[in-house]
């Protein structure tokens, strides 16, 4: 199983698409590692700096609705993965992106809109950490001086099994 | 209780239900291209599992960047080519025979009603036009599909759209689907399939149905589906006539078993009357941002692009050429046409369509996806604007800093003449 949790990158916008996560011009790469420097390069979000050094520390992305819409490219989760980001928390995901995350043994966690709104209004985007308790299905956000917030999540049992197996190839190869 | 076509396909293909709410389906056709397959191939090799579940059920094409634009693209093509050779994949389409996957594979008769189809490409939903469950997947799903012939899905609910009325002159399937996406929004059909019904759909050709289903994913849908009918039989006839002993009625009866039952249960039903629908185009960076072309004044364009898996088929080129004929592209506007397959290219040549475009100042390229996703053959520069028959207008899609307005081939052709976004009805 992969490791989950760490500093959070807040992306306060809905409908962030796969072209923004990793532009198509890098799809001629044949290794995942080569995608690393280009993560979120074309993200249209005022104030966002794709090359900011702090981005490199982030391990969790928190965002709004319909994250990962557009292309089927698994290059989007890979670009996150090679940058150490193995969890995306959102109000909702595009189907293919969500499946790609779990297929890679990573997590695409859906939270109700109220929880997402609560995180965006409470957390300090510059200092928030997220601990992920996979078995207890709990996220613990902490920021500033001792401020914290705990949020429950629920994975569907298949998705949880993929995370535990390390991905769909591992799961399918053992079973079919 | 009746079943939808999707439920019927799931019931006949389910191989495993590892957990409640997840069905693992056997897959009838696994489609591959050179962008999303090589990393699956490399992973299979690294795992010592460089094999395929059934070479006859795997079809592969080099289409996204072809001929290769650089060494990296050439490497991707080579990885796919070498893999196809090693694994005896007969239906592999290399340079000279290759075309845009979602136009080429149907043209070869690979997609049939009731099939399950996956591909590492989000516009795989196109093939639902044949009454198939066709879903875009990522590279890992593709890899498992290649190795095991299965894929896992949450059984999707169905949105049924009944399209009534009659399309006015100058209004096409592309306008209908843009209107549908505007109505549903970009995630209105997530985890759902869209069924298209009604007299307008019944009257559509397979080309038009493919245009419609192609963009179902832009509303978040897993697949778009049309009910297979006599039109479907006609399209597939060269490939299925032997199977049905030259009896079209038998083929039709067999195809019709995939129709959704009249008492099937739908998540949502939407009725649209298209009689008053006008030519439309997208105006922002999301495909649900749609406006009437006659309300878009003075939006200057730099490029017209006619092609792609949405609108690069022969009927699309015919419509555009009928508007382009005898005109010239406006000063300062460049035009690019990419017929979607070699067959379409050849027929367009025989019909004089290619010459019509060239006479008007268009560049006609080989069949490829390149420009649509800003990889090759028509990439935009910063600040440039394109009137495009493709399916995505995301920020940077056709080139960093470029703006893409999605529209029908007729609207794109008219815009090329005007030098700005234009209503095609003024040019018919």
Image: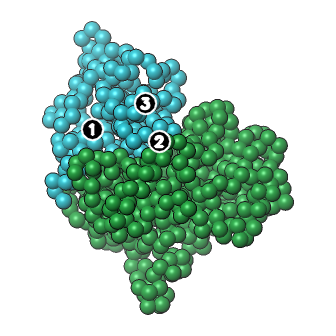
Chain A as rendered: colour: cyan
* Residue bearing the label numbered 3: A39
Residue A15 x, y percent position in the rendering: 47, 38
Q: Chain of mark 2?
A: B
Near mark 1 (Cα within 10 A), the count class, few <14, some 14-19 or many ≥20, is many
For the residues labelled 3 and 1, the Cα–Cα distance comes to 17 Å
What mark, if any, has residue B50 been given in the picture? none
The picture quadrant where one finds residue B22 is: bottom left
Residue B349 x, y percent position in the rendering: 70, 67
Reply above or below: B306 against A123.
below
Chain B as rendered: colour: green
**Would residue B22 be found to the left or right of residue B235 on screen?**
left
Dot placed on the residue nearer the N-terminal end, 3 or 1: 3
In this rendering, the label closer to the viewer, 2 or 3: 2
Residue B147 x, y percent position in the rendering: 27, 58
Q: Chain of mark 1?
A: A
**Would residue B218 be found to the left or right of residue B311 on screen?**
left
* Residue bearing the label numbered 1: A106
Near mark 2 (Cα within 10 A), the count class, few <14, some 14-19 or many ≥20, is some
Could you tell me which quadrant the C terminus of chain B lies in?
bottom right
Foreground of the two, A176 or B421: A176
Foreground of the two, B21 or B317: B317
* Residue bearing the label numbered 2: B72
For the residues labelled 2 and 1, the Cα–Cα distance comes to 28 Å
In this rendering, the label closer to the viewer, 2 or 1: 2
Looking at the rendered structure, the secondary structure element under dot 2 is helix
């Amino acid at each position: 199983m992969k490791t989950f949790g760490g500093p959070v990158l807040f992306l306060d916008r809905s409908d962030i698409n796969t072209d923004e996560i990793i532009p198509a011009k890098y799809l001629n790469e044949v290794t995942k590692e080569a995608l690393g420097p280009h993560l979120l390069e074309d993200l249209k979000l005022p104030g966002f700096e794709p090359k900011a050094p702090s981005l490199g520390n982030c391990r969790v992305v928190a965002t709004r609705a319909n994250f990962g819409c557009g292309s089927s490219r698994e290059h989007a989760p890979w670009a996150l993965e090679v940058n150490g980001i193995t969890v995306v928390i959102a109000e909702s995901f595009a189907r293919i992106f969500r499946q790609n995350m779990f297929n890679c043994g990573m997590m695409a966690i859906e939270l109700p809109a109220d929880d997402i709104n609560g995180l965006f209004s409470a957390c300090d985007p510059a200092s928030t950490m997220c601990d992920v308790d996979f078995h207890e299905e709990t996220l613990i956000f902490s920021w500033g001086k001792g401020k914290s917030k705990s949020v429950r999540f629920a994975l569907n049992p298949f998705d949880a099994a993929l995370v535990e197996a390390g991905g769909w190839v591992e799961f399918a190869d053992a079973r079919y | 209780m009746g079943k939808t076509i999707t439920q019927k396909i799931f019931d006949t293909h389910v191989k495993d239900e590892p957990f409640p709410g997840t069905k693992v389906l056997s897959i009838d056709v696994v489609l591959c291209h050179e962008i999303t397959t090589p990393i699956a191939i490399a992973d299979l090799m690294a795992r010592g599992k460089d094999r395929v579940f059934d070479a006859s059920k795997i079809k592969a094409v080099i289409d996204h960047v072809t001929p290769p634009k650089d060494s990296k693209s050439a490497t991707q093509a080579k990885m796919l080519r070498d893999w196809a050779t090693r694994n005896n994949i007969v239906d592999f389409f290399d340079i000279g025979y290759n075309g845009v996957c979602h136009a080429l594979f149907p043209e070869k008769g690979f997609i049939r009603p009731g099939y399950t189809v996956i591909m590492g490409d989000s516009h795989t939903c196109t093939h639902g036009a044949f009454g198939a469950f066709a879903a875009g997947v990522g590279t890992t799903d593709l890899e498992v599909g290649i190795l095991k012939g299965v894929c896992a899905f949450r059984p999707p609910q169905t949105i049924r759209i009944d399209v009534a009325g009659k399309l006015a002159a100058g209004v096409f399937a592309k306008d209908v689907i843009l209107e549908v996406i505007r109505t549903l929004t970009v995630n209105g059909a997530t985890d759902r399939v869209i069924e298209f019904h009604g007299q307008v759909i019944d009257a559509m050709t397979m080309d038009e149905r493919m245009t419609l289903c192609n963009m179902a994913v832009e509303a978040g849908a897993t697949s778009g589906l049309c009910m297979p009918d006599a039109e479907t039989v006609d399209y597939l006839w060269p490939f299925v006539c032997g199977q049905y002993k030259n009896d079209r009625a038998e083929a039709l009866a067999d195809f019709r078993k995939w129709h959704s039952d009249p008492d099937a249960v739908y998540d949502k039903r939407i009725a649209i009357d298209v009689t008053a629908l006008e030519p439309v185009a997208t105006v922002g960076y999301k495909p649900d941002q749609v406006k009437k072309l006659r309300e878009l004044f003075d939006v200057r364009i730099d490029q017209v692009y006619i092609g792609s898996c949405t609108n690069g088929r022969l009927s699309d080129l015919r419509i555009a050429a009928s508007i382009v004929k005898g005109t010239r592209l406006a000063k300062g506007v460049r035009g690019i046409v990419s017929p979607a397959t070699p067959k379409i290219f050849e027929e367009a040549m025989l019909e004089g369509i290619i010459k019509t475009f060239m006479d008007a100042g268009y560049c006609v390229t080989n069949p490829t996806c390149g420009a649509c996703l800003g990889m090759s053959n028509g990439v935009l520069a910063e600040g440039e604007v394109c009137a495009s028959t493709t399916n995505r207008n995301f920020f940077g899609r056709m080139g960093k800093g470029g703006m893409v307005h999605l529209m029908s081939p007729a609207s794109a052709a008219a815009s090329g003449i005007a030098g700005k976004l234009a209503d095609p009805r003024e040019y018919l």
